[in-house]
Image: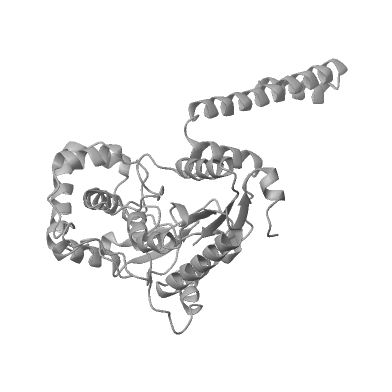
Amino acid sequence: MKMAGRALEHHYRKLGLTVYKLAFRDHQRSYFKSLKDAQCQFYSNHINKNTGNSKQLFATISHLLEPQQPSSTEVTKERCNSFVNFFRSRANNIRSLMPGSHPPPSPAFNPLFGSLQFLQYFTEDSSSHTDEILQKMKSSSCTLDPIPTVLLKSFIPIVSPIITKLINLSLQTGHVPPSLKTAVLKKPSLDPEVLASYRPISNLTFLSKVLEQTVAFQLQSHLRCNNLFEKFQSGFLSAHSTETALLRVKNDLLMTADAGSPSLLILLDHLHHTVGLSGTALQWFRSYLSGRTEHVMLGGCKSRLSTVTCGVPQILFLGPILFTIYMLPLGHVISRHGLSLHCYADDTQLYIKTAPNPSEAILHITACLEEIKAWMNSNFLQLNSSKTEGLLVGTPHQIRSFPIS
């Protein structure tokens, strides 16, 4: 259709006849209508194909409603270095804002040692399990990978025994090679002029991801056997999601309202405890968390290598699990004040029914929030006050008759 339109335009401009002008105009209208119909059909098929994939649906809607504008900023090595400095200074600034004299940590989360089975060493992984991990992994590659992942996955029967041997060597020695602890931070879809829009999400080598999945499998098995997972944590767990968290909280609030009591809901956005790690397994995690490095890559430019001083790699396999372990004592802090809770990663909802004594319920919440702040300060975490909200939830009549404004 495009070539036919150009031919009609050529005849019109060459001969100047009205008949060619009208034919060209009608053809262009039909052409642009066909483009619009094709675009609508494409997105309709894409939405139908991803009906159960909320991540893809939200990304599609965001792309349609807020298309990314190309940045006018030239990406240079100095610009990449400014990102590295920003990520490093953000963590240091949070720590510098902590009170100089930390309050004593809240009582530790310590399961009974009599019933706790220690994970002293990792069991050797099998080639069949490595095959399963390789087949399920995405084909996306990291710039640090020596060969494209899609090519590597096409030779799984050949490379699987080699990868299994490398993984088992790391598990047996309790050592993670430095080459597997370097991350690339890149997010080309965001505006380089707005540093605060970026998060240090780690992009690691393919072998690093396989190693993390192997360890994560054994660590999760250990946590499940010892019942160490937070009961009301929906983040990073199989068959759990933001939907399960919302359903549980909404159900509790509705049941409380049906019983005749409104609820106060607090939404939070935000160490020493024993989970039974020792021996070579504990040594492996020390090696995994220490000596990590990262650099930023934007538009083909790469920053200098920077040392990671705190935190765990984001959006990978082990990082989220280790973060939930670090946050385990928080559930016990909240429960002591008689509040219900539900978490999704670092987002926490606290709620309590206000009947029969609303003033007492508010005192419980206030005391709980103070202890949460103290616990976070003593564990180098920051409570995001700008995203902490309080809601009174109930029927319209219950909210209107609530004695405290």
Q: Residue at x 18, y 61 (%)?
A: 281
Residue lying at 68% horizontally and 49% vertically, measured from the top left: 399
Residue that sits furthest to the top in the current view: 19
Query: What residue lies at 17% left-to-right and 57% top-to-bottom?
Result: 115
Quadrant of the rendered image containing residue 362: bottom right
Quarter of the C terminus within the rendering: bottom right
Residue 17 screen position, x and y as percent: 86, 18
Residue lying at the far bottom in this picture: please name it. Answer: 101
Q: Answer yes or no: is residue 223 visible.
A: yes
- Foreground of the two, 355 or 200: 355
Q: Residue at x 34, y 70 (%)?
A: 107
Where residue 21 appears, as percent x and y from the top left, is: 83, 21
Q: Is residue 9 left or right of residue 169?
A: right
Q: In this view of the protein, can residue 194 be seen by the observer?
A: no
- Indicate whether 231 appears above or below 284: above
Q: Position of residue 134 (x, y in %)?
A: 25, 41
Report how many numbered discs are placed on residues in the image.
0
240 or 40, which lies in front?
Answer: 240
Q: Residue reaching furthest front?
A: 356
Residue in the foreground of this view, choosing between 76 and 108: 108
Give the colouring mode of the picture. one colour
Position of residue 249 relative to residue 196, above or below, is: above
Q: Does 153 sit above or below residue 265?
A: above
Residue 304: x percent and y percent?
Answer: 41, 69
Quarter of the figure with residue 291: bottom left
Q: Quarter of the image for the N terminus: give it.
A: top right
